[in-house]
Amino acid sequence: MNRFLFCLLALLTVSCGPTLKETDYDPAGATETQDRPISYEVKRTFRMDKGRVSFSNEYSGARLSAVEQTGPDAYTLTILPENEPINKSAWYGFQVWGTSPRQLKLTLSYPGYKHRYVPKLSTDGSQWSPVAASDLVLDTTTFSLTFPVSITEKPLWVSAQERFPSDSVYAWEERIGREHEGVKLCLGYSHLGKPINLTNFGNLGSSNWIVVMGRQHPPEVTGYLATQAFMETVLGESELAKSFREKFRIVMIPMLNPDGIDLGHWRQSGGGVDLNRDWANFHQPETRAVRDYLINTVAEGISVDVAIDFHSTDSDMYYVFTDDMQTHRQGFTSLWLNRIRAIIPGYEPDTEATDMASPSAKYFFFNELRTEFITYEVGDETPREEVTQRAEAAAIAMMELMQ
Ligand SMILES: [Zn+2]
């Protein structure tokens, strides 16, 4: 090839490639999604005060990097991210117990980062309650958080959010699949070899699909609680749900990032990157698995009408497509938000137009599938009954509009 032609082709290739942009809350380099090293935490039990007090990170989803005793029954717990630069979502999780009942003063320290999640406590790992706001002391210089806990001989769980490791998500997926004639497929495997599953519900012969997905970002547990409430409403016994399921195939991909969840990551996958910035370049096996499956179905004449991707952030927020975006359900989202307002009087959903230059999942769903895509963000500390109520309303609103 002559040199001029080669340069012209090179120029065309560059100028035709995707223009990707980091969002204002992304750290530098978030859209470069080739594998990056992660530091694996050493799993251990920290025996403090001559063995009178113990802290452990020896379970999946835990994160506790170091422990230092700073006074009688006072401890500073250092929490470090899996790699850097990273989104500021300081996840932590550990167990603490003593040789006899006592009250401790714990300080969570995130060197270089701010405290984000109100600590949740549990004695059994399934029932959780947040530490009372009046007990939390935030240091406005170091952004560390100090709070009291009462410990006994039995381990107390202390966690940034309720704990839902990958095995609990697989178990839930299995259970609702069994109860509602779901057909499960394994789309592929995560970086560390965990299944990325999809379960089909409803009319499997329908060419019109709804996609529900989540858990790209490990700490975003409230998004998972919303996914459960949303799916259980769509799979419910109401006449509305039954007739919806006769018309549509509902495709659920509840967990994109099992590695990050089980490693107690703040943000990243087993490959050390933000999976929700990999939907243009597809360097990671988790995003590739979903893309390959959906791209093939479109070639078979399937229309992925609507997709909802569940996440969490400071407060409830929906990133939405504008009415002028040409999708299979153009204008759906505005109508859907109006329906939610009507179902929950007084609830005013916070919305923002999606940034189409950021290579998150909507980038792929819009550009390749013309899907009407909603990024459904649930507040970190939204009362859990409101998380459920709003997700149920979101499911009802969708089904009513798509009759
Ligand atoms: Zn997220």
Image (tube, rainbow, N blue to C red):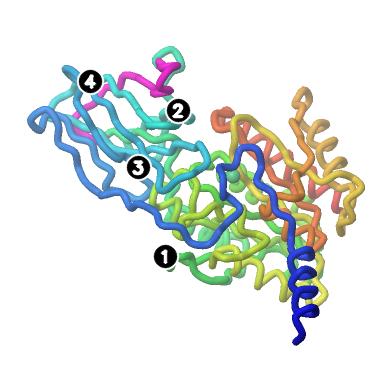
Q: Earlier in the sequence, mark 3 or mark 4?
A: 3
Q: Earlier in the sequence, mark 2 or mark 4?
A: 4
Identity of the residue drawn at 58% across and 29% down: 382
Identity of the residue drawn at 26% across and 37% down: 66
Name the residue type under label 3: Arg
Label 2: which secondary element: loop
Name the residue type under label 4: Ala
- For the residues marked 1 and 4, what is the alpha-carbon distance in whole angstroms? 37 Å
Quadrant placement of the N terminus:
bottom right
Can you tell which mark lies on residue 74? 4
Q: Which residues are magenta?
A: 136-155
Above-or-below relation of 244 to 334: below
Q: Disc 3 beta carbon < 8 A from ligand 1?
A: no
Q: Position of residue 41 (x, y in %)?
A: 30, 49
Label 4: which secondary element: strand
Residue 299's image quarter? bottom right
Label 1: which secondary element: loop
Q: Which residue is mark 1?
A: 192
- For the residues marked 3 and 4, what is the alpha-carbon distance in whole angstroms? 19 Å
- For the residues marked 2 and 3, what is the alpha-carbon distance in whole angstroms? 14 Å
- For the residues marked 2 and 4, what is the alpha-carbon distance in whole angstroms? 18 Å
Q: Are marks 1 and 2 in contact (CB under 8 Å)?
A: no
Can you tell which mark lies on residue 115? 2
Residue 65's image quarter? top left
Rate crowding at label 1 as few (under 14), some (14 to 19) or many (20 or more) other CA atoms within 10 Å: few
Q: Is residue 237 visible?
A: no
Q: Which residue is mark 3?
A: 63
Name the residue type under label 2: His
